Amino acid sequence: MGMSTKASSEATFTRRGILAAGAALAGVAASAGVASAAEATSSAKDGAASAATDGKAYDAVIVGSGLSGVSTGVRLLEQGVGRVLIVTKADFGAGCNSRVAGGQFLFPMEDTDAGVQAMVDSFNKKSKGKGRADLTQLVCANSKAANDWLVSHGCSFTDPNQVKPYDVLAVSAAPGGGKGMPALMDQMCSEYQNAGGEVLANAKLLDLVMDESGAVSGVKVRTADGVRTIAARHVVIATGGYLANKAIMEIACGADGDEIMVRGDKTLTGDGLLAVERAGGMRYCMGGIEQSLHIAPVPPDMPALCPFASAMYTVVVNAAGERFVDEGLGYVAIGKGAYNQPGQTHAMIFDAATVNEVKVMKDDLDKFNNFGIPVAQADTIEDLAAQINVDPATLAKTIDDFNAATDGEKTTGLAIEKTACARPVSTAPFYAFYPMVPGGTQCFGGLYTDGDCRALEADGTVIANLFVVGEAIGGLFAYDYIGGGSLTRCVTSGMHVADVIAQA
Ligand SMILES: Cc1cc2nc3c(=O)[nH]c(=O)nc-3n(C[C@H](O)[C@H](O)[C@H](O)COP(=O)(O)OP(=O)(O)OC[C@H]3O[C@@H](n4cnc5c(N)ncnc54)[C@H](O)[C@@H]3O)c2cc1C
């Protein structure tokens, strides 16, 4: 892809409009550039005022305090970049999906070029070759160093395990079991503040500020005290995804996109994406639910709970009691398949033999019980049908047909085959995780960047001084991803952008 730093005339026009609006509101001259006043900031979680009012621009303003934003900040300070400010919409280190994430990170099976290549190949397999090659390489090649770096900053992890059948190792933020991210986030936030990083919390990015050359020169934010303009030599967008923005979800995913449950933080509305677009940038890889979203089947009462390991061992039916998806493809395929079903509601059915013989099935059943999420249970399929609100005769036929078609591994002769883990549903008691709905976990679409995570206009022109990190980057993943890839992306992209800024 060819790139230039010369802005197109249309983009220049747009940028001047933004500059004028920002300058009028903030009361600064339209030609302010990077040397206008840096505004009051806070180093306290509640956003209480402290001072950085010496009139100098920040070396870097990072928007967002999830893992990508905080990693960028810690690395910048470590590299000697002196004045760094994180502006964030909620409290510092909160209001983000990094805090509620399961905590899985990835790196290669062996720390060699061949190991990195095997990880790249694994990412490509999941993304059907549609993921950005340069970003995939960046993430995979730096993933081990990123994990070591987190450890050097006081974070701890469980022992590595292979993510079968892929050539990738996974670790989880300690203590594991989905419980490690709050501690990891607190640790990295402390590292940032202890190194002298400043924070302006409860401040919402409204727009980017540009100078007359078309380069980004700051941000306009809204705080409880009003709108402020903050000057910066570099701006890093770390605002996460857009799952809670119903308008974007409808456009990206289709008419029912607005109905997809938001699993994580409900305030992540793609603000950074929209601000960069207004500055001439482009959203990228938003091609329908298949390519632009990672969703998972979850109980509506507990969107954090996904039976992701056992889903493929179940038989999944819609509100009519009929199968609609090859469950053997796993939980993301089930979530995406359910998107087009009536009400998006579905049931995941399994039997006592599967609970007894498949460890992950028993583990997930225990998880539901431990969290107090009711699981339907009955001695006959007809009685189970009554509990999951489907017609008993239809469900009995669906299960009979399935049992007749399976050899225990895969089915043959069904309109929708099950290609793996096709265990019969024949030993009472019978169970169902119900109701289940697709819950949005992560956006694969996002902002268009180059391989160094610089924001680009549609024609490949670099928007000077503007970077994107973490989930806000579009196009690294498509269709599906290996769990852990996103947190790994947050740290690798944050470290890389910090290194690029430090060398500027
Ligand atoms: C339930 C769940 C489990 C997951 N588990 C895993 C996992 O195990 N492994 C994995 O790799 N991925 C996982 N993911 C995905 C992963 O958590 C996210 O992709 C990742 O945390 C995104 O990090 P981020 O720093 O890019 O954004 P976030 O962590 O979402 O942070 C965004 C930040 O931007 C701020 N912000 C937004 N708009 C503005 C604005 N206008 N002005 C100022 N600030 C703003 C927010 O307040 C927030 O601080 C999971 C997601 C969910 C929902």
Image (cartoon, rainbow, N blue to C red):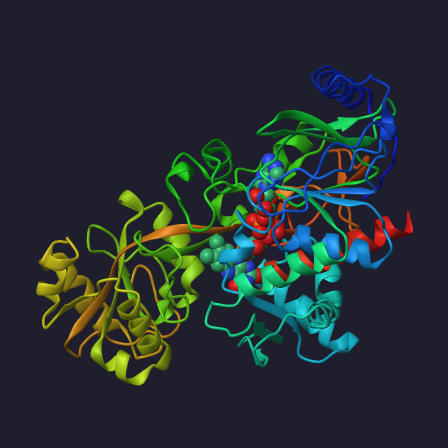
Q: Nearer the viewer, residue 464 or 114?
A: 464
At x 49% / y 36%, what residue is drawn? Answer: 245
Q: Nearer the viewer, residue 141 or 147?
A: 147
Position of the N terminus, as image quadrant, is top right
Measuring from the top left, give residue 161's x and y in whole percent.
Answer: 56, 80
Measuring from the top left, give residue 366's x and y in whole percent.
Answer: 30, 74
**Quadrant hosting residue 298:** bottom left
Left or right: where 86 falls relative to 310: right
Q: Nearer the viewer, residue 409 or 368?
A: 368
At x 22% / y 62%, what residue is drawn? Answer: 374
- Figure label count: 0
Q: Is residue 85 above or below residue 297?
A: above
Residue 467 appearing in the image: yes
Left or right: where 400 falls relative to 502: left
At x 86% / y 30%, what residue is drawn? Answer: 34
Measuring from the top left, give residue 232's x and y in whole percent.
Answer: 80, 36
Left or right: where 194 falls relative to 65: right
Residue 480 appearing in the image: no
Q: Furthest-right residue in view?
A: 504
At x 38% / y 52%, what residue is drawn? Answer: 337
Left or right: where 501 falls relative to 393: right
**Quadrant hosting residue 199:** top right
Q: Is residue 307 above or below residue 74?
A: below
Measuring from the top left, give residue 137's x and y in whole percent.
Answer: 74, 61
**Quadrant hosting residue 397:** bottom left
